Image: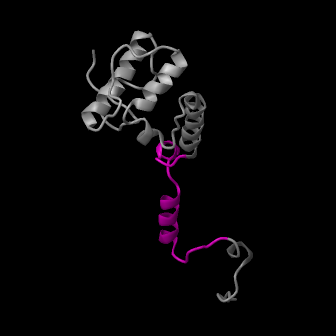
Amino acid sequence: MMKNRSFLEPQQLFFHSPADPAEEEEEEEEEEMPATEKDLAEDAPWKKIQQNTFTRWCNEHLKVLNKRIADLQKDLSDGLKLIGLLEVLSQKKMYRKYHLRPNFRQMKLENVSVALEFLEREHIKLVSIGKRFCPWLGAPCGSDR
């Protein structure tokens, strides 16, 4: 007896089942991404949670300076809020002068380098962050000293 295709079987009510088995395999390949790729994806949920948590933590400490971070990468890119955060947390001033109004990329990079040098002098090691690359800048931070 032939099945009438106009009626859906119970399992087809909730799931789309393609007529062609090759089409089914393609759908599975598209939907399933390896676990490591999911974790490394730009929009991975754990990354957003971590980013939001760190942003709130920074803002809590920056209240003292009446400063606020909305976007980590953008707001830390000129080094000023990063320097402010370090000064608040350490209760010390930077060892070197920095640009209060960094208009050029070079000035911004120098400010970030001042912050990194401060961390080095205070014997604070950054885990998984090298001097050569600043994730908040998406660019090199200066030279190794």
Q: Is residue 118 above or below residue 51?
A: above
Q: In the image, residue 18 lies at what x, y percent?
A: 56, 75
User: Is the C terminus in the top left, top right, bottom left or bottom right quadrant?
Assistant: top left
Q: Is residue 70 above or below residue 127?
A: below
Nearer the observer, 51 or 66: 66
Residue depicted at 57% across the width and 34% down the height: 59
Image coloring type: one colour
User: Is the N terminus in the top left, top right, bottom left or bottom right quadrant?
Assistant: bottom right
Residue depicted at 28% across the width and 31% down the height: 107
Nearer the observer, 10 or 87: 87
Q: In the image, residue 50 lies at what x, y percent?
A: 57, 37
Q: Is residue 88 above or below residue 107?
A: above
Q: Answer whether residue 27 is magenta in the image.
A: yes
Residue depicted at 51% across the width and 47% down the height: 38
Quarter occupied by residue 57: top right
Residue depicted at 61% across the width and 31% down the height: 60
- The magenta stretch is 15-44
Q: Is residue 72 above or below residue 16?
A: above
- 120 to the left or right of 19: left
Q: In the image, residue 62 lies at what x, y percent?
A: 55, 30
